[in-house]
Amino acid sequence: MKGRGVDEMDRFVSRADVVIIATDVNSHTAVMYARKAAKRFDREVILVRNCNPTRFKELLDTLEMRQAA
């Protein structure tokens, strides 16, 4: 979260439909900032401990089903 990290986080979150935050690989500060940025840009947040490709596909499938309903 030093240097351009804050600006890049804002840019990523502002362009996202949903923000998935992997807490295992990110610092406490980064997780807190991502959550605040998501709230500021009115984005849905999903917190996961880690996110392998299988878990990511499950998340996308769940989001797709919710959107279809």
Image (cartoon, rainbow, N blue to C red):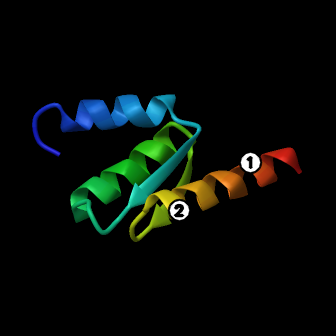
Taking the spot 32% from the left edge, 58% from the top edge, the residue there is 31
Going by the numbered disc 1, the residue's amino acid type is Glu
Name the residue nearer the viewer: 25 or 11: 25
Which dot marks residue 36? none
- Element type at mark 2: helix
Along the horizontal axis of the image, is 27 left or right of 38?
left
* Disc nearest the viewer among 2 and 1: 2
Which label number is shown at residue 54? 2
The residue at the point 17 percent across, 31 percent down is 4
Image point (24%, 37%), residue name: 6
Q: How far across and how far down the image is residue 65, in percent? A: 79, 53
Circles 2, 1 touching at the beta carbon (< 8 Å): no
> Residue 64 shows which numbered tag?
1
Is residue 60 rendered to the left or right of residue 34? right
Residue 58 lies left or right of residue 46; in this view the side is right
Q: Neighbour class for label 1 at 10 Å: few (<14), some, many (≥20)?
A: few
Q: Quadrant of residue 8?
A: top left
Label 2 Cα neighbours within 10 Å, binned few <14 / some 14-19 / many ≥20: few
| Residue pictured at 20% horizontal, 37% vertical | 5
Question: Residue 16: x and y, percent?
Answer: 52, 35
